[in-house]
Image (cartoon, rainbow, N blue to C red):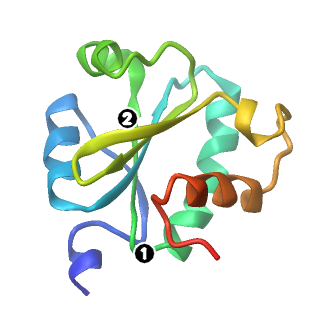
Amino acid sequence: KEWLSKGHGEYREIPSERDFFQEVKESKNVVCHFYRDTTFRCQIMDKHLTVLAKKHVETKFLKLNAEKSPFLCERLRIKIIPTLALVKDGKTQDYVVGFTDLGNTDDFTTETLEWRLGCANVINYR
C-alpha cells in the first residue's frame, strides 16, 4: 500500500527535472526512461515498461522527456535515446543505453528487459 501511494505499480510521465529529484528521494528503486517523442524506439520501450511497472510494484517506473531535461541529461551523461537510468537509494547505479543490452533488436521481449533490470538489482527478479 505504501508503494502504491508513492506512485508504484504504474508507468507514468513526470513533468520536469525538479520532479525527478523528488520522485527518486521517496523510493528505494526507480527506473526512469529518458525519451523523445520523435524516437520510435522510445515507444517500444514504453510498451515493455508499462507491463513491468504493473508486475514489479517494488520499483517506481517513470519517464521524462529528454528534450525538456537538459540539465539532468548532462549531469547523468545521457547521450543516446532511449536511456533508462536505474536509481537505487537516490543514486543512479546503472544505465540501459539504447537496445544494446537487449539483443540490439527492436523486437526484444519484455522478459529480456526484465532480466536486465534484475541484473542491476533495481527489481526483484528470480
Residue in view at x 32 percent, y 12 percent: 74
**Label 1 vs 2, first from the N-terminus:** 1
Which label was assigned to residue 33?
none
Left or right of residue 123, residue 52 in this image: right
Q: What x and y, as percent, mark residue 3?
A: 27, 76
- Work out whether 39 lies above or below 122: above
The image quadrant that residue 21 belongs to is: top left
Mark 1 secondary-structure assignment = loop
- Work out whether 35 lies above or below 31: above
Residue in view at x 39 percent, y 28 percent: 65
Mark 2 secondary-structure assignment = strand
Residue in view at x 75 percent, y 41 percent: 102
Looking at numbered disc 2 in the image, what kind of residue is underneath it?
Answer: Leu
Q: What x and y, as percent, mark residue 109?
A: 80, 55
Q: What x and y, as percent, mark residue 103?
A: 83, 38
Looking at numbered disc 1 in the image, what kind of residue is underneath it?
Answer: Val
Q: Find the distance from the CA under tag 1 to the CA under tag 2.
A: 19 Å
Write down the residue under mark 2: 64
How many residues crowd mark 1 within 10 Å: few (<14), some (14–19), many (20+)?
A: some
Write down the residue under mark 1: 57
Where, quadrant-wise, is the C terminus in this rendering? bottom right
Mark 1 or 2, which is nearer the eye? 1
Residue in view at x 56 percent, y 17 percent: 80
How many residues crowd mark 2 within 10 Å: few (<14), some (14–19), many (20+)?
A: many
